[in-house]
Image (cartoon, rainbow, N blue to C red):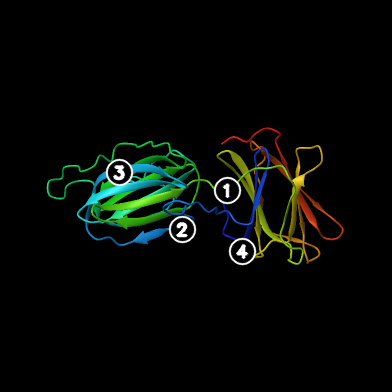
Amino acid sequence: MWTAPLRVGVLALTAMVGLALTATTASAISTDLPAPTQTGPVTATGTGYGQLVNVRTGRHPGYDRVVFDFTGGTPGYRVEYGTLTEQARGTPVPLAGRAALVIVFNPAAAHDLNTGAPTYDISQTLNPSLPTLRQIRFGGDFEGYVAAGLGLADRVGFRVFQLHSPDRVVIDVAHQPTQPFGTDTVWLGNAGHNTIVNGVRSGQHPGYDRLVFDLATAEPSLVFVGYRQNTSTIVVGFSGRNVPAVVNGSRQVHVGLPALRGLSWSVYANGRRAPSSAPHSGTGSG
């Protein structure tokens, strides 16, 4: 999926057989913990020189969980999206999925510090095949560092925390936001706001395609989204206080996705810009 720097506002449109339109992407989930939403790097200090002894996975409502079990305390860590590499060599380690979440533990080891005997087999590949978590691989156990990578179905929110008795580091990765798809016309926003679009992008997700308009305003102007009569074309119209509307930045839209086939723009005399997307008549696939 193509990504861009975070804008002030984001308007997301997803296409499957119908429409799903929101001003935000987070959905509330009632469970023991909410689904995580942050995607930036996370760092923390530990409580000791952790020796890895086990890795466990599980599915929760709204997220998948990975638990790294340690003895000797929990190590410090840095967790971020990137590329898992072999320690000391720098060779990339491929992971199943569209995104890789990389964890580097320090000080940590996957072997007994006194005897050198392995405490956990980091040569193995784990394939839990959960909704988001697809694979776990390791990049090495070298000079106090243990590197691991999570292969994910997509770039999603995650959270990291430590637990004790026994010592463990927990990583939760969110499931894709779930919203109903429909075919009814949608109105959103307020005509009193300006229409300023900083860019437009699209990408394929499991089960649907997404079209994103990055806005320069905290709130969208008046937005109309609906099917053009008797066609498979979805019309997205922006009407705002400013005339003409302002459309800046790049338009990195993938052509020929399972549902989203293309994008065209029209400019009207009153300054209103109406982009229209033409989804395929069939169901999008993941």
Q: CA distance from mark 1 to mark 2?
A: 17 Å
The amino acid pointed to by label 3 is Val
In the rendered structure, the answer to whether residue 272 lies left or right of residue 174 reads right
In the rendered structure, the answer to whether residue 101 lies left or right of residue 45 reads right
The amino acid pointed to by label 4 is Val
Is there CB contact under 8 Å for labels 2 and 3?
no
The x and y percentages for residue 269 are: 87, 58
Q: Which residue is mark 4?
A: 8
- Residue 2, numbered label: 1
- Residue 55, numbered label: 3
Other residues around mark 4 within 10 Å, as few (<14) / some (14–19) / many (≥20): few
The disc, 3 or 4, on the residue closer to the chain's N-terminal end is 4
In the rendered structure, the answer to whether residue 76 lies left or right of residue 190 reads left
Q: CA distance from mark 1 to mark 3?
A: 31 Å
The disc, 4 or 1, on the residue closer to the chain's N-terminal end is 1
The amino acid pointed to by label 1 is Trp
Q: Which residue is mark 2?
A: 40
Is there CB contact under 8 Å for labels 3 and 4?
no
- Residue 180, numbered label: none
Q: CA distance from mark 3 to mark 4?
A: 39 Å
